[in-house]
Image: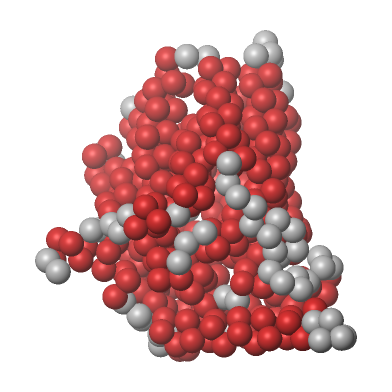
Amino acid sequence: MTKKRRLSLDLSPLRTSRDFRLVFIAGLVTAFGSFISYVTIPYQVAKLTDDPLMVGLIGVCELLPLIFMSFVGGALADYIDRRLLVLGSEAALAAICGILLINSLSDEPHLWLLYVAAFLTAAVAGLQRPALQAMVPRLVKPEELPATMSLQSLSMQFAQLAGMPLAGILLATFDLAWVYAFDLLTFAVSLVCLALVKAVPPPVAADRPSLKSVVTGLRYAKSRPELLGTYLVDINAMFFGMPSALYPFLADDLGGPKVLGLLYAAPAVGSLLATIGSGWTARVHRHGLMVLIAAALWGVGIVGVGLSNTLWLTLFCLAFAGAADMVSGLFRMIIWNQTIPDHLRGRLAGIEMLSYTTGPLLGQLRAGAMARTGLGVAGSIWVGGVLCVIGSVALAAALPKFLRYDGEHGMALKKAADDEWNATAASRTRSPLT
């Protein structure tokens, strides 16, 4: 096998699984539209308030429902048809987008409604994402999981790369209503694709959603050092190194609304390049080490963003940070999907979602609050990047088992846990007469 072939992206899951193809297309299309709204909502808040803290408060509105709904969504994903949960949630997200469209048509758009929409979107996402994450491993072969994670990441990065610059162009050219209308149109495509996916029933003898079932998932996560490591490293990196709430203000200094889309999209450029060349990840087994190194490099890139005063250097540093974050994300997803038993997949996906959303959402608030101090916008960004690097080094010292984690050992643990659950489930469901 040539070096080029070893580094190239593996497309086999798209060839072998019809249902994964449909989920892939749905995710790509809806993410494309959603990334446009992701740029538009902070932009609209910034224009209505001219206050970075008010933009950062969007993250707080999203965090509160996620804390609760991630556990609810995870428990439901282990008990009901995961495809139905994903489809119903997608329809609800489309309805929320419709609310944003109607609000934008008003002569005086309501600021409070933007925060309500952010709250509701996060709540619905808390139901959808655990089910989606738990569903995908059931659609592909176990040996195709690394390639599957890369493909899913590729779809998100491509959507971000295309959607966010387009958002800047649309915002500079058209009224807000047209931007939200475009997002609403993409939901129509994703709903059709998801409706065509076959049912994904829950595991045999699935746990009924309850506080006890949620606690079971939390106890399992606590018992696995490699899982705790992924959560803590990502929270640290995103809390200190996620300055996206400041992009509308950074754009004002670098070129205006048309530059805003480039700032949001630049990390996706790096992520896309890292994903396209991700073939090497399947041959690396020191997953914990790679997560830590990549998280520290993300912080280095964010330091560069804060210290830069030119557009091209800012975009380069954001792209570098995005590539590092993608490498970290790929190995975190591999750890999650190759080690967690299927009967706990939904609940653990809820915990995962809480970990990778809590950091960015709180990070937006941190960035906005620090920017209001004497540090300013640039200082808030580079100081956060420095703290991210320091935190990554500290976690490497505090989590030696995560640092030494080997993926082959994790897969063996998952197989043993699945076999034990299936044997127990069979004994519980066996007829007394057999």
| Residue found 55% across the figure and 49% down from its top | 364
In the displayed structure image, the side of residue 170 where residue 87 appears, left or right: right
| Residue found 54% across the figure and 31% down from its top | 189
Q: Nearer the viewer, residue 188 or 256?
A: 188
| Residue that lies at the very extreme toward the top in this rendered image | 107
Q: Is residue 177 above or below residue 359?
A: above
The answer to whether residue 6 is visible is: yes
Question: What quarter of the picture does the C terminus occupy?
Answer: bottom right
Question: What quarter of the picture does the N terminus occupy?
Answer: bottom left
How is the rendered protein coloured? secondary structure
| Residue found 66% across the figure and 43% down from its top | 87
Q: In the rendered picture of this protein, how many numbered marks are placed on residues?
A: 0
| Residue that lies at the very extreme toward the left in this rendered image | 2
The answer to whether residue 388 is visible is: no
| Residue that lies at the very extreme toward the right in this rendered image | 432
Q: Nearer the viewer, residue 343 or 300?
A: 343
In the displayed structure image, the side of residue 217 where residue 379 appears, left or right: left
Residue 322 drawn at (x, y percent): 35, 53
Residue 147 drawn at (x, y percent): 37, 62
Q: Quadrant of residue 41?
A: top right
In the displayed structure image, the side of residue 353 where residue 207 appears, left or right: right
Residue 107 drawn at (x, y percent): 67, 10
Q: Nearer the viewer, residue 176 or 178?
A: 178
| Residue found 57% across the figure and 87% down from its top | 416
Q: Is residue 120 above or below residue 399?
A: above
Residue 124 drawn at (x, y percent): 70, 46
Q: Is residue 141 above or below residue 102?
A: below
Q: Quadrant of residue 93?
A: top right
Q: Quadrant of residue 104?
A: top right
